[in-house]
Image: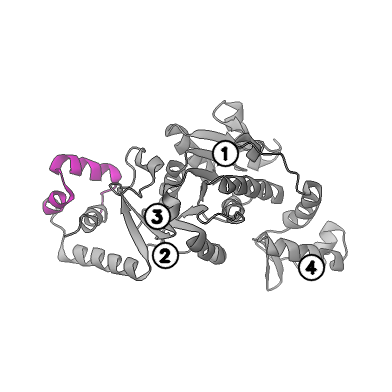
Amino acid sequence: MSDIFNKLLILRTPGIGPARYNDLLRRFGAPGAVVDFLNPSPEQRDSVLREMELAGSQHVYYIDDCDVRYPQNLRMVKNHPPVISVRGNLDVLNKPMVSIVGTRHATATGMGFIADVAHGFAENNYAVVSGMAIGTDTAAHRGALRSGAKAVTIAVLAGGVDYVWPIENESLYREILVRGAIISEMPVGFVPVATNFVQRNKLVAGLGEKLILGEADLKSGSMTTARFAIEMGRDIWAVPSHPADLRAFGPNSLIRNGQAHLCMGVEDFFDVEKKQQNLSKKVDVENNLIDALGMVPVSESVLAELVKKSVSEIKSELVVLELQGLVRKVDGGYVRA
């Protein structure tokens, strides 16, 4: 019987997480001996076998912490997941990693900044780790994917690696499978509940050698991730923003309290020239259009009125933003991607 099967049998037993798993392993010495002690039912054994069969059919790999491919930063975290499931390009697992997180309701300017930082890290052989949520996470993944490198980004999911969430990011999920990897500590096929997102955040924090925090309010999941990273002794960087914006409270507070370095761009980490890349034009377009959008579709005529431009003028701008993955066209108009 394989060690992976035994380890999954232990981890899929109700009430057993990484801490309890480690206690049992210290007590009994080997996964097989722990399984003998737990004496799982035939139904439990069949459930794990079905999970492993499903994983195999979807090209999902189980990587335990005895495997040389297990990410080194994560291995050093106390009570790290003994087994993770991985789908995609396994080459990404042993690259240096940076975690980038922030609010789902990021400004267009904030997302553009994060995408540029992520791109810079990917160009310098880092894998960019984030949670595949809309907003900042999406910007981080897409920024990394702009790089010409082969293995550039890792999405950490709260559910199984085969459970795409949010569904709006299905195309991003497919791109990451080719150019990076999807990681989870949850069973294949698992649909997440609220508490699983906290576990996901801890995994994101553990994977990166440093964490960059974009826009985030004080009570956000991103701040939870930052707190995990601080506890793990990670190098924390925060992107400042206008103090009147709730999305600035998180990063600004970490900078003020001395818990994070001030992040001004990718040049903080690498010897590169500062590149404006038509920043003024980008700010005009994004602030005027993207900031006018949310989850409720807005028609072209209403958008034109909001930004005080003609419909013909905003059509071309919307096409560009759609190609950049910043907006989506749906029934009834446009929404923020």
Q: In which quarter of the image is the N terminus?
A: bottom left
First along the sequence among labels 3 and 1 = 3
Instruction: Describe residue 41's horizontal placement relative to residue 13 as left or right.
Output: left
The magenta region covers: 14-36
Q: Which of marks 1 and 2 is in front?
A: 2
Q: Residue 184 carries which label?
A: 3
Residue topped by disc 2: 162
Disc 2 marks a residue whose amino acid type is Asp
CB contact under 8 Å: marks 3 and 1: no
Q: Does the residue at mark 2 contact the one at mark 4 (Cβ under 8 Å)?
A: no
Which mark is on residue 218?
1
Neighbor class of circle 2 (other Cα within 10 Å; few <14, some 14-19, many 20+) is many
Residue type at tag 1: Leu
Q: Mark 4 points at which residue?
A: 300
Using the rendered image of the protein, determine whether residue 102 is visible from the camera's viewpoint: no
Residue 144 visible in rendering: yes
**Residue 296 among those drawn in magenta:** no
The residue tagged with tag 4: helix, strand or loop? helix
Circle 3 crowding by C-alpha within 10 Å: few under 14, some 14–19, many from 20: many
Secondary structure of the residue carrying tag 3 is strand
Q: Main secondary structure of the magenta part?
A: helix
Q: Foreground mark, 3 or 1?
A: 3
Mark toward the start of the polypeptide (2 vs 4)? 2
Q: Position of residue 59 (x, y in %)?
A: 37, 66
Q: Give the mark toward the camera: 4 or 1.
A: 4
For numbered disc 1, what is the local secondary structure? loop
Q: Nearer the viewer, residue 110 or 86?
A: 86
The Cα atoms of the two marked residues, 2 and 4, are separated by 36 Å
Which mark identifies residue 188?
none
